[in-house]
Structure formats: C-alpha cells, structure tokens
Amino acid sequence: MNRDEAFTLLKEYTQSESLIGHALSVEAAMRHYAERLEGNVDQWGLTGLLHDFDYERWPNVPEHTQEGAKILRERGVDEEIVGAILSHAEWNQTEYPLDRPIRKTLFAVDELCGFVTAVAYVRPEGLNGMKAKSVRKKLKAKNFAAAVSREDIDQGAELLEMDLNDHINEVIAALQKMEN
C-alpha cells in the first residue's frame, strides 16, 4: 500500500477532521523518528497514518485495532505495519509487544502528538516557538486535555530511552515540519 492508498483508506473510514489531523500528525512524528532511528520512513509513516483509521467505526475495546487489522491484511498491508498498529493498544500487547523500534515509537508519539496539538490550539502562536517547557506545564494541569494519558506519554519517552523534554521537542519539531 502506498501513501495515497493509505490516505484514501483513512478518509473512507474516518469522517472527523480532528481524527484525520491526528493521523497526519502521528504520521509526521513517525516519519521524523524513522529518519532519526534509521527506520523505513515510508513504512513508519504509513503506520502513523493508519494507526486509528478504524476508530470511528469500532471505538470499543478490543474491536478498535483488531477490526482495522483485518481490513489491512485483506488489502495486503505489510505485517510489520499491522503488528505495530496492533501493538499501540494495550489490549493487544501480549501478542504484539512493544519490542521493536517501530512499535515503541508509535506508542511513544500517539498520545504526545494529541497533547502537543492541544497545547498549540491554546497558544496564539500555535506550534511556532513552542518548547517542551510549555508542554510540561500543561501536562501538570490534569483537566487540560484530560483524555490524554500522561502515563503513556511518560512510558513512551522511557521506551525510546529519551528524556521527556527531548522527546517532546522531537515531536514539536516533527509537527512544525508538517506545517511548513
């Protein structure tokens, strides 16, 4: 599956502009980290783009990710992508553990992309000039973007063996590249 086909699939299953925006931001972060970690940029990008494509139709556990995996397999998508998508949901992590760079990275950027985007929405300058310090300040406000798991954000930085500030700055950089 190429990027155009993946985007068409995303749009077929996802109507929400915010969810499409999230998919695009996770794609950008995955591509950014693939370059940094010597991963396959296209493979990692497709993983980010498609990681939640099934969420609107199947938002409940365990259908989310598992129904999407069936569709992806029917369309011949690389099993490395399918496995990474399955691994980002904790209910699949026994069978699809966070044991590979692509899986660790998807888990690490998913929640953080959503959070950084939320922070950008409340800043007059958006992502422009954003630093980890402002994101960390908002992380302490439990009622700001309350649905975002702070524990997953912390665990993601640990999985990547990175300082949280460095990880936040990498995601900010990825999202800034996406804007340009």
Image: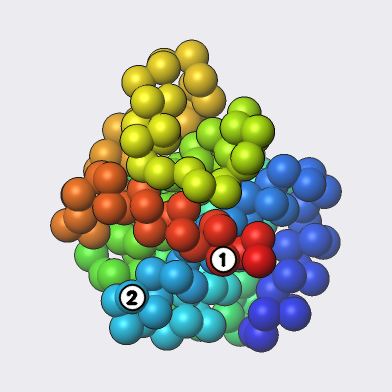
Viewer-proximal residue among 33 and 106: 33
Image height of 67 relative to 84, above or below: above
Label at residue 177: 1
User: Label 2 belongs to which residue?
Assistant: 36
**Mark 1 vs mark 2, CA separation in Å:** 14 Å
Left/right of residue 18 with respect to residue 81 in the rendered view: right
Looking at the rendered structure, the kind of residue marked 1 is Lys
Q: Quadrant of residue 57?
A: top right
Looking at the rendered structure, the kind of residue marked 2 is Arg
Q: Residues within 10 Å of mark 1 (few under 14, many from 20)?
A: few
Q: Is residue 4 visible to us here? A: yes
Q: Quadrant of residue 37?
A: bottom left
> Residue 172 location, x and y as percent?
46, 53
Q: Quadrant of residue 102?
A: bottom left
Quadrant location, the C terminus: bottom right
Viewer-proximal residue among 69 and 7: 7
Residue at image position (53%, 25%) is 145
Image height of 132 relative to 22, above or below: above
Label at residue 22: none
Secondary structure category for the residue under label 1? helix
> Residue 113 location, x and y as percent?
50, 48
- Colour scheme in use: rainbow
> Residue 121 location, x and y as percent?
64, 34
Task: Tell me, yes or no, whether the two marked residues, 1 and 2, touch with CB atoms within 8 Å.
Answer: no
Residue at image position (50%, 47%) is 129
Residue at image position (39%, 79%) is 35
Quadrant location, the N terminus: bottom right
Left/right of residue 92 with respect to residue 176 in the rendered view: left
Residue at image position (49%, 62%) is 174
